Structures are given as C-alpha cells and as structure tokens.
Image (cartoon, rainbow, N blue to C red):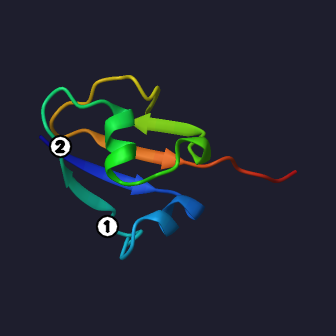
C-alpha cells in the first residue's frame, strides 16, 4: 500500500532529504500499523506526541490503509 507522510518540525531531522512541501511517498505492506510506519522512518517513539491519519487523531497500534495521509507531530512548546 502507498501512503503520504508529513513530518512536523524536529521530526523532519530523522529523515534525510525530507521535503516539507511534498512530504514522503512511502510503500508499506498491508496490515501495517502507524507504529510500523514510524519505525520504518526511524522516528523515535518518545518524540511523537500526536499522530493524524486523514485529518483524525490516531494511535500507534491503528491499522493503515492504502492511500492514507499520515502526519506525525512532536510535542509543541509555547505559551
């Protein structure tokens, strides 16, 4: 299955050559979870605070489907 992946801020540093405007096109096997995708991209689990799939919040154990748009976000500071 093919997925579109977007990475926010500091998570981009873990994927050499990441282009924020286009994101990544990633091929994964059927039955892959969000967590499998994060490991495939070498994203440290402790750095991922929010996962969005097709604009809705998901968990690492949720299954992915062909064509999904996945976004990973680290903790955001401010105030």
Is residue 73 shown to the viewer in this render? yes
**Mark 1 Cα within 10 Å, few/some/many (few <14, many 20+)?**
few
Query: Are there few (<14), some (14-19), or many (20+) residues within 10 Å of tag 2?
Result: some
Mark number for residue 79? none
Q: Which is nearer the eye, 55 or 49?
A: 49
The answer to which of 8 and 37 lies nearer the viewer is 37
Whether residue 55 is visible: no
Q: Which residue lies furthest to the bottom in this view?
A: 17
Residue 66 location (% of width, % of height): 15, 36
Across and down, in percent, residue 77 comes to: 78, 52
Q: Earlier in the sequence, mark 2 or mark 1?
A: 1
- Residue 23 horizontal side relative to residue 71, left or right: left
Marker disc for residue 28: 2
Picture coordinates of residue 70, whole percent (x, y):
36, 43
Relative height, residue 75 to residue 53 (above, below): below
Q: In which quarter of the image is residue 31?
A: top left
- Callout 2 secondary element: loop
Q: How many labels does the image show?
A: 2
Query: According to the image, label 1 marks what residue?
Result: 22
Above/below status of 66 relative to 63: below
Residue lying at 45% horizontally and 56% vertically, measured from the top left: 7
Q: Write the residue at 56% across / 43% down.
A: 48
The extreme right residue here reads 79
Q: How far apart in space, not on screen, are marks 2 and 1 (Cα)?
A: 18 Å
Q: Residue 58: image x %, image y %?
A: 45, 27
Q: Is mark 1 on a helix, strand or loop?
A: loop
């Amino acid at each position: 299955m093919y997925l579109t992946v977007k990475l926010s801020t500091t998570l981009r540093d873990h994927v050499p050559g990441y282009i924020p405007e286009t994101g990544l096109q990633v091929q994964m096997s059927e039955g892959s979870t969000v967590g499998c995708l994060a490991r495939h991209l070498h994203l440290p689990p402790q750095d991922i605070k929010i996962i969005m799939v097709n604009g809705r919040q998901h968990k690492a154990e949720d299954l992915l489907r062909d064509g999904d748009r996945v976004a990973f976000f680290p903790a955001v500071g401010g105030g």
